[in-house]
Amino acid sequence: MSTPRNNELEQEFFELICYMVTSARNLIPENKLYGPFRLIDAVSRLIDIIRKLDLKSPRLEAIQRQIEDGKYTVMESEEEFTVFLENLVMGLVPLMEDHGKKP
C-alpha cells in the first residue's frame, strides 16, 4: 500500500541509490580519496533514513556523529583522513561488543 510516508521513504532510498551509483561511475577518474569519502557519506545518509523510520539506535547515532565530525578531513590531508577512518573503524568494535551483551 502506498502512503505519503512510504512514498517519502522510497524517494530517500532512491536518492541514496542514485548517489551511490553515480559516485561509483564518477570515481573512475577522481581522486582516490573520494571513494572512501563517498562511502562514509552514504552511511551517514542511510542512518538519516533509518532514523526517519523511527528506528532509534544510539550506536548508529554515535557512528553518524563521528562521521559528520570528521568526514571533511579528506580536504585537509590523506594522513588526517586515514587517521579519521582508522578511528571510525576502531570505534565500531566497542559498539559491536556492547550490542552483543545480554541484559
Image (cartoon, rainbow, N blue to C red):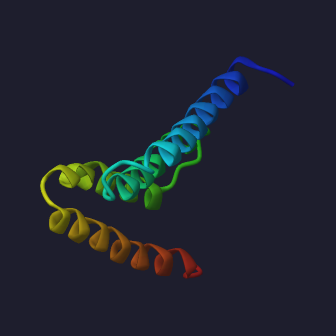
The relative height of residue 86 versus residue 3 in the rendered view (above or below) is: below
Which residue is pictured at 30% across the width and 53% down the height? 31
Q: Give the quarter of the figure containing the N terminus.
A: top right
Horizontally, is 43 left or right of 63 in the view? right
User: Looking at the image, which residue sits at the far front?
Assistant: 29
- Residue drawn at the location 51% of the way across and 48% of the way down: 24
**Is 12 positioned to the left or the right of 31 in the image?**
right
Quadrant for residue 11, please give it: top right
Q: Position of residue 58 (x, y in %)?
A: 44, 57
Quarter assignment of residue 26: top left
* Total count of labels: 0
Residue 93 in the image, given as x and y percentages of width and height: 42, 79
User: In the drawing, does residue 101 fall left or right of residue 36?
Assistant: right
| 83 displayed left or right of 36 | left
Q: Is residue 47 above or below residue 12?
A: below
Foreground: 4 or 76? 76
The extreme left residue here reads 76
The residue shown at (45%, 62%) is 59
